[in-house]
Amino acid sequence: MRVLNHLFERNSHWAAGIKQADPDFFLKLSKQQKPEYLWIGCSDSRVPANQIVDLLPGEIFVHRNIANLVIHTDLNCLSVLQYAVEVLRIRHIIVCGHYGCGGIKAALEGGEHGLIDNWLRHIRDICRLHRARLEATADDREKFDLLCELNVREQVINICHTTIVRNAWSSGMELAVHGWIYSIGNGILKDLDLCTTGPEEVERLYAIS
Ligand code: CO
């Protein structure tokens, strides 16, 4: 019960497999990390960042929380963002939502879930912001999918408004913020065409219907 032996066994097989393909892989990685991407995704176990985009350790910097939210006062997320942009100098920030997100569903349906309701409150705010559009969508499934997509857009906007990203842009750094959504049902990513590469492009995000 205390020792999860099967996980240690899986780990040694995994490490041996990588070393077989590249004997120096871990030695090289231990000296530095130089990822090009920051991934902000949902904690959902079915949405693992590295595997979805088929990247090895060292290639993507990751922050995950319930419903892939970027909250203006969340020191955890902001610290990841600052480190990724200012120290690692990543070039792309990817907000990746997913259809069928339990956090989005709970926010859409209401009800009480305890402490997490304080976190889901941010998604309820998005519902309020896009009430007309959501109310005009009669089909429950479509409404759920739409809110998953709208949530990605709002988080892209939130990232673009952080001092970290604004300072990076004003200093001339090349930095793109992307909004994607993943389908658990078929393993396929979709680009929501929210790519923003400078402050003058942020207004466009508000105008997308
Ligand atoms: Co989710």
Image: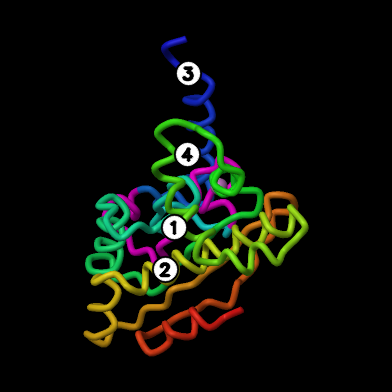
- Please report the bounds of the magenta region as a residue range: 27-52
Magenta span contains residue 111: no
Of the numbered discs 3 and 1, the one sitting upstream in the chain is 3
Q: Which residue is mark 1?
A: 40
Q: Identify which amino acid the numbered label 1 is placed on.
A: Ile
Q: Which residue is mark 2?
A: 93
| Distance from the alpha carbon under mark 4 to that under mark 3 | 17 Å
Q: Identify which amino acid the numbered label 3 is placed on.
A: Leu
Q: Which residue is mark 3?
A: 4
Q: Does the residue tagged 1 have its C-beta within 8 Å of any atom of ligand 1?
A: no
Q: Does the residue tagged 2 have its C-beta within 8 Å of any atom of ligand 1?
A: no
| Distance from the alpha carbon under mark 3 to that under mark 2 | 34 Å
Q: Residues within 10 Å of mark 4 (few under 14, many from 20)?
A: few
Magenta span contains residue 47: yes
Of the numbered discs 4 and 3, the one sitting upstream in the chain is 3
Task: Say which quarter of the image contains residue 106.
Answer: top right
